[in-house]
Image (tube, rainbow, N blue to C red):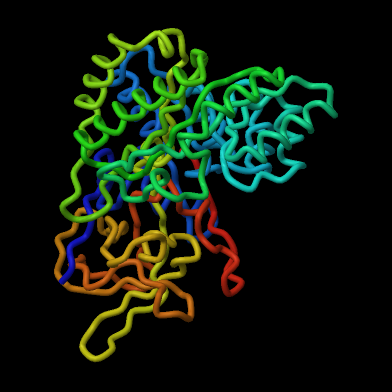
C-alpha cells in the first residue's frame, strides 16, 4: 500500500459526495455534460490571495504567473485580485489581453522570445524581462522601428543556488536570464539607449515548502539586487523577487509557513538600501494561488483484476494530469491526493490502482491506494489540480482531447 497525498482544506462531503464550493460533484458533472472535468473554486482562490496579503508586508505586491492556469474565467477572476500578471509567450499575451488586462500590469519572461512576440509586447506596453544581451538589442531595434519607448527589465541568473526548491531556475549554467556578473553592464546599456527602465527579475526556483530556505533565498535576492544596482550606479524602480511558494502534494508534505516568511521579509524591508528604497517589490506566484483550489474529476469506466491487483480504469489520465501521473519532473512516483468522490465520507476498505484510459503504462493516477470500494460509474477526484494540470499536459495525446473546465 502506498499513501496518498493530503487533501487540501476546504473540501467537505455533502450527502456522502465530495462538494466543491457547496455543490456535489455529480451536479457539477451533470452541468458540464461529461467527464473528465476540472473544477476550480473561486472562493478558495480569493481566500488564498487574502491570506497571502495578510501574511506578507503591506508594501509587497503580488503577481500571478498565468502558466499555472490560464483558463479564461479563472484568469479574469484572479486578475481582479492581484497586482499584475506574468506571462511567458505571445499566446499568453493574447490571453491576458482577451481578459481585458492592461499591458502596464503585465511582465513577459522566458528565453527564446520571437521578434513578433517582442513586437506585440512592446506595442502593448508590456514590461519585457530580458533574457540575454541579444534579446535586449533585438527589443531596442524593434522599439525604434515602432517608434515606441520599450519597458525593459532584466531577468537575472543569480550567482547563488536556492535551497529547498523542487525545481531550480537559477544558479550555475542556465538558459534563463543574464548571468549576474554581466547584468550591471547591460543595465547601463539599455538605460543609455533610452528605454523605460523597469528593474530586475530574479526567479530562483519553485515548489519550496521550507520557510527557512525561502527566507534565505529572499535575503540573497535582495542582496544581489542591491549589489548589481550599486555596480551599475543606479537605483531600481522595480524588483520581481520571483516566487517559489509550494503546496503539499505528497504524504509527509506540510504547508509552507507563510506567516514566518512574511515576518522575515517585513524585517528586511525595514532596512533596505538606497538602491531599493523606492522600488516596487513583487513576488510572482502561480501554483500557490490556484493549485489547491482545483479538482480533476474522472469517471470509472472499468473495474478489473490482474494477478491479484485491482485496477480502476478511468476516462481521464496523464493527458490532463501529467504531473499527477508522475511524469512531470519527479524522479520517484508518489501519489497525489485522490479520493473516490462519489463516496467521499466512506471508510477505505480495499487497495486499488487508479489508472487512465491511455495505451501506456505511464498513465497512472494512484498506485496501491487505500480507498473505499468503487464501481463503474463512480467519480474519482484528483486534488491539487488547479495548477499545471490542463495547462501543462498533452491533451492531444492519442487523440483524447482536452477536459472540460469550470469555475464555481
Residue 141 visible in rendering: yes
Residue 28 visible from this viewpoint: no
* The N terminus, quarter of image: bottom left
Left or right of 313 in this view: 75 = right
Whether residue 53 sits left or right of residue 142 in the image: it is: left
Q: In the image, residue 310 lies at what x, y percent?
A: 26, 80
Residue 301 locus on image (x, y percent): 42, 74
Determine the residue positioned at 72% across, 33% down.
Answer: 139
User: How many marks do you count on the picture?
Assistant: 0
Considering only vertical position in the picture, is 85 above or below 371? above
Q: Is residue 280 left or right of residue 154?
A: left
Measured as percent of width and height from the top left, residue 382 is found at: 35, 56
Question: Of 388 and 148, which appears nearest the observer?
Answer: 148
Residue drawn 43% across and 23% down? Answer: 282
Whether residue 51 is situated above or below residue 292 in the rendered picture: above
Q: Quadrant of residue 227?
A: top left
Question: Relative to residue 372, is residue 187 depicted above or below?
Answer: above
Horizontal and vertical percent for residue 28?
Answer: 45, 49
Q: Is residue 161 left or right of residue 347?
A: right
Q: Residue extending furthest bottom? A: 307
Amino acid at each position: 500500500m502506498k499513501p496518498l497525498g493530503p487533501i487540501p482544506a476546504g473540501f467537505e462531503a455533502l450527502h456522502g459526495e465530495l462538494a466543491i464550493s457547496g455543490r456535489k460533484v455529480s451536479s457539477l458533472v451533470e452541468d458540464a455534460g461529461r467527464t473528465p472535468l476540472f473544477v476550480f473554486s473561486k472562493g478558495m482562490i480569493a481566500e488564498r490571495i487574502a491570506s497571502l496579503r495578510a501574511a506578507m508586508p503591506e508594501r509587497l505586491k503580488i503577481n500571478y504567473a498565468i502558466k499555472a492556469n490560464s483558463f479564461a474565467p479563472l484568469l479574469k477572476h484572479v486578475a481582479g485580485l492581484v497586482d499584475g500578471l506574468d506571462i511567458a509567450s505571445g499566446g499568453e499575451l493574447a490571453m491576458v489581453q482577451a481578459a481585458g488586462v492592461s499591458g502596464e500590469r503585465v511582465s513577459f519572461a522566458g528565453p527564446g522570445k520571437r521578434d513578433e512576440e517582442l513586437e506585440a509586447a512592446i506595442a502593448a506596453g508590456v514590461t519585457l524581462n530580458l533574457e540575454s544581451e541579444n534579446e535586449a538589442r533585438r527589443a531596442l531595434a524593434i522599439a525604434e522601428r515602432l517608434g515606441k519607448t520599450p519597458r525593459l527589465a532584466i531577468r537575472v541568473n543569480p550567482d547563488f543556488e536556492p535551497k529547498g526548491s523542487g525545481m531550480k531556475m537559477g544558479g550555475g549554467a542556465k538558459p534563463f536570464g543574464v548571468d549576474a556578473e554581466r547584468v550591471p553592464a547591460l543595465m547601463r546599456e539599455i538605460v543609455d539607449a533610452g528605454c523605460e527602465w523597469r528593474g530586475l527579475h530574479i526567479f530562483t526556483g519553485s515548489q519550496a515548502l521550507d520557510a527557512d530556505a525561502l527566507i534565505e533565498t529572499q535575503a540573497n535576492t535582495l542582496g544581489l539586487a542591491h549589489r548589481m544596482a550599486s555596480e551599475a550606479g543606479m537605483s531600481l524602480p522595480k524588483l520581481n523577487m520571483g516566487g517559489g511558494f509550494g503546496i503539499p502534494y505528497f504524504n509527509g508534505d506540510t504547508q509552507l509557513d507563510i506567516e514566518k516568511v512574511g515576518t522575515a521579509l517585513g524585517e528586511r524591508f525595514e532596512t533596505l538600501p538606497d538602491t531599493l528604497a523606492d522600488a516596487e517589490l513583487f513576488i510572482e506566484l502561480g501554483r500557490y494561488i490556484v493549485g489547491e483550489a482545483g479538482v480533476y474529476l474522472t469517471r470509472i469506466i472499468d473495474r478489473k483484476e490482474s494477478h491479484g491487483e485491482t485496477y480502476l480504469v478511468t476516462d481521464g489520465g496523464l493527458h490532463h494530469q501529467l504531473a499527477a501521473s508522475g511524469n512531470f519532473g519527479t524522479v520517484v512516483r508518489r501519489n497525489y491526493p485522490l479520493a473516490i468522490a462519489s463516496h467521499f465520507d466512506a471508510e477505505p476498505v480495499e487497495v486499488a490502482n487508479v489508472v487512465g484510459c491511455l495505451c501506456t503504462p505511464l498513465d497512472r493516477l494512484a498506485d496501491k491506494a487505500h480507498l473505499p470500494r468503487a464501481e463503474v460509474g463512480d467519480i474519482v477526484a484528483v486534488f491539487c489540480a488547479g495548477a499545471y494540470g490542463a495547462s501543462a499536459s498533452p491533451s492531444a495525446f492519442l487523440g483524447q482531447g482536452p477536459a472540460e473546465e469550470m469555475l464555481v
